[in-house]
Image (cartoon, rainbow, N blue to C red):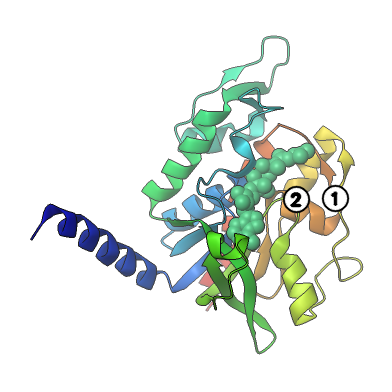
């Protein structure tokens, strides 16, 4: 067989196997930002089948660009254990004990690599365009290739079934929006709807990101900025400890739910 055929066949076969193995997952994570990637790693570490569906070609979400494209970010002491688990380096800021800087490219690539090495699968260039909603439960995702979405091609999607869905889509909390708009669900918030992200207040935002990481509807969880948008938390700019801790908390909540008999 010509090497050209060997290459093409191997890619098609391996992708098909990987995709089929992830058509039914324990946790379907929408968005490969920092919170989604951290959740994926800890779920995979705990033995759950976790798959990340990321719209962009490169996962990593808002981590790559640091602050205003200066490719450094800040984390606080409480999140260092997570960076250690991913083997990502950091250095304490001289005049701000308890706060650390790290290279945002190392963070993005380290989170992607760590999630995959733990056994999570990442499907990039895949957009989640809808949810599967059966018997008043969020039961999975409706997916399509991002180029199909971007070009508005009339191509029907495929589905992934999941015991738990994590909205890690960042600021817009797209999956929560879909659940409200298309399934008419009431989320576990004051109004039943999305309260909306508040302006910048970095220290409060960091705390609320973790506090707002919750199951908002049976089978539907939110992490990171999506969680803050749902429950009206403040934004915090390029400090990322809250995103990392939110991902770890989301993994714990999902694992606890899936482990119940
Ligand atoms: C597939 C999708 C879809 C979809 C979106 O924004 P993210 O980095 O997410 P978080 O919440 O883990 O991290 C937030 C952080 O990056 C940030 O923005 C901060 C700290 N902001 C503070 C401030 O003050 O602004 O990543 C979300 C990912 C992105 O890669 C999207 O492409 C992806 O989700 N995504 N993927 N299907 N429907 N919607």
Q: Position of residue 182 (x, y in %)?
A: 75, 79
User: What element does badge 2 sit on?
Assistant: loop
Q: Which class describes the residues within 10 Å of circle 2: few (<14), some (14-19), or many (20+)? A: some
Q: Residue at x 87, y 71 (%)?
A: 192
Quadrant occupied by the N terminus: bottom left
Q: Position of residue 96 (x, y in %)?
A: 73, 15
Which residue is at a point 68% across and 76% down the rendered structure image? Answer: 218
Is the shortest distance between ligand 1 and the CB of mark 2 under 8 Å? Answer: yes
190 relative to 6 in the view: left or right? right
**Pointer 1: what residue?**
197
Question: Is residue 57 shown to the viewer in this render?
Answer: yes
Could you say which quadrant of the image residue 92 lies in? top right
Residue placed farthest to the top in the image? 94
Relative depth, front residue between 126 and 48: 126
User: Residue furthest toward the right?
Assistant: 191
Instruction: Tell which of 178 and 116 is nearer to you.
Output: 178
Query: Which of the marked residues, 2 or 1, is nearer the chain's N terminus?
Result: 2
Residue 215 in view in this figure: no
- Tell me whether circle 2 and circle 1 mark residues in contact (CB < 8 Å): yes
Q: Position of residue 222 (x, y in %)?
A: 69, 59
Secondary structure at badge 1 equals loop
Q: Which of the numbered marks, if any, corresponds to residue 171?
A: 2
Whether disc 1's CB lies below 8 Å from ligand 1 is answered no
* x and y, in percent, of residue 232 in the image: 86, 53
């Amino acid at each position: 067989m010509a090497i050209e055929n060997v290459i093409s066949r191997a890619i098609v076969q391996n992708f098909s196997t990987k995709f089929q193995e992830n058509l039914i997952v324990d946790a379907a994570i929408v968005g490969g930002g920092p919170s989604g990637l951290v959740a994926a790693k800890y779920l995979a570490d705990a033995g759950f089948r976790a798959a990340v569906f990321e719209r962009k070609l490169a996962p990593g979400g808002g981590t790559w660009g640091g602050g205003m494209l200066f490719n450094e970010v800040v984390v606080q002491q409480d999140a260092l254990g997570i960076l250690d688990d991913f083997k990502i380096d950091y250095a304490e800021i001289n005049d701000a004990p308890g706060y650390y800087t790290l290279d945002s490219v190392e963070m993005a690539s380290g989170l992607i690599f760590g999630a995959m090495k733990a056994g999570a699968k990442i499907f990039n260039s895949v957009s989640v365009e809808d949810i599967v909603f059966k018997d008043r439960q969020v039961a999975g995702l409706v997916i399509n290739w991002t180029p199909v979405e971007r070009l508005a091609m009339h191509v029907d999607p495929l589905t992934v079934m999941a015991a738990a869905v994590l909205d890690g889509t960042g600021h817009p909390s797209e999956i929560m929006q879909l659940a409200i708009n298309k399934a008419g669900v009431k989320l576990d918030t004051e109004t039943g709807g999305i309260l909306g992200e508040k302006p910048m207040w970095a220290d409060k935002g960091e705390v609320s990101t973790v506090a707002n990481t919750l199951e908002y509807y049976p089978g539907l969880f939110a992490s990171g900025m999506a969680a803050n948008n749902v429950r009206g938390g403040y934004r915090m700019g390029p400090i990322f400890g809250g995103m990392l801790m939110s991902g770890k908390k989301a993994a714990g909540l999902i694992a606890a739910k899936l482990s119940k008999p």
